[in-house]
Image: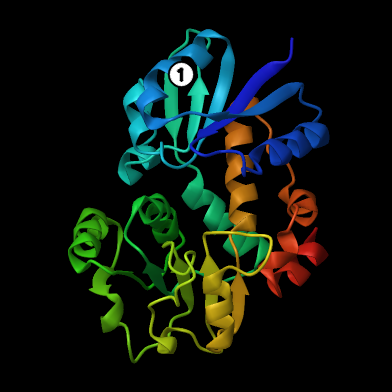
Amino acid sequence: MTDRYGVIGHPIAHSKSPVIHRLFAEQTGQDISYEAFDIAPEALDEQVRGLVDAGIRGLNVTVPHKQAVARLCARLSPRARLAGAVNTLVVQPNGTIEGENTDGTGLVNDLRGNLRARLAGTSILILGAGGATRGIVPALFEAGPREIVVANRTVDRAEQLAREFRALGTIAACGFADLGGGTWDLVINATSAGLQGEVPPFPPSIAGPGTLCYDLSYAMHDTPFVAWARDHGAGRVAQGWGMLVEQAAESFRLWRGVRPDTGPVIARLPGAPGASDTMEARLTAS
């Protein structure tokens, strides 16, 4: 019998997860199906439980459900508990749900494995202090950076996040306006800045010839942040296509016990060349 999996979000029609997991299944010889389920926030509990009752074996979780879905889990992994967010549900044979967060691992795997970026001993700036940032900070600290600075439009929110993660390593907080005067080894955009057509509100000095600017968002063309970073002299730019595939591979491993080769899947993604010059290295590696 074919095992059923899927992704939940609202909206969800744009999701590339069904394509990614179909490619994983073909590559590994796993007999699975994978569907996208559009679930409104007010229907989350009822519909997830209905999917479990109908035999679903696991679900990926995207916005706006990553935090709310944690209440449906009988157990959270240490990483999901620390992040306060869940992006993968594993359904046990007895119907209990376990929650995991593979976002941070996916990001680090893309940075180190696909983009050949060095993280140990580096300075990392994260723009934004929302759920996306919470999901990646623990895994970034495991990679051994010298420091992480979280900048946010609302400084109080960045400071709160920094307090919660200070046991993991050196982490500081500031506002966007306080960033002038320094460049970084890695700048990660975890905001929606620019997506509505406005200019991203970051000082140009954060990007230099030695900076990799990485946008957690992805699109069929350059995202506003990637375009901004290139215009302001960033040495390398990348969208989140690789992270999308790498976090999916971690979910697939949790469900099926085998980890697919991500390189060929990244190369085949619709729109993946929108990750600009970094795709040359990705296509070569695959």
Q: Residue at left 72%, top 22%? A: 32
Q: Quadrant of residue 173?
A: bottom left
Q: Is residue 59 left or right of residue 192?
A: right
Residue 94 screen position, x and y as percent: 48, 7
What is the image's colouring? rainbow
The residue depicted at 39 percent of the width and 42 percent of the height is: 79
x then y, percent, for residue 272: 72, 59
Front in this rendered view, residue 174 or 177? 177
Three-letter code, disc 1: Gln
Q: Nearer the viewer, residue 55 or 164?
A: 55
Quadrant holding the C terminus:
bottom right
Residue closest to the far front: 197
Residue most toward the bottom?
Answer: 181
Residue pictured at 57% horizontal, 73% vertical: 226
Residue located beneath label 1 in the image: 47
Query: In this picture, is 204 found above or below 63?
Result: below
In the displayed structure, would residue 43 be above or below residue 216? Answer: above
Q: Is residue 34 above or below residue 93?
A: below
Residue pictured at 44% horizontal, 62% vertical: 192
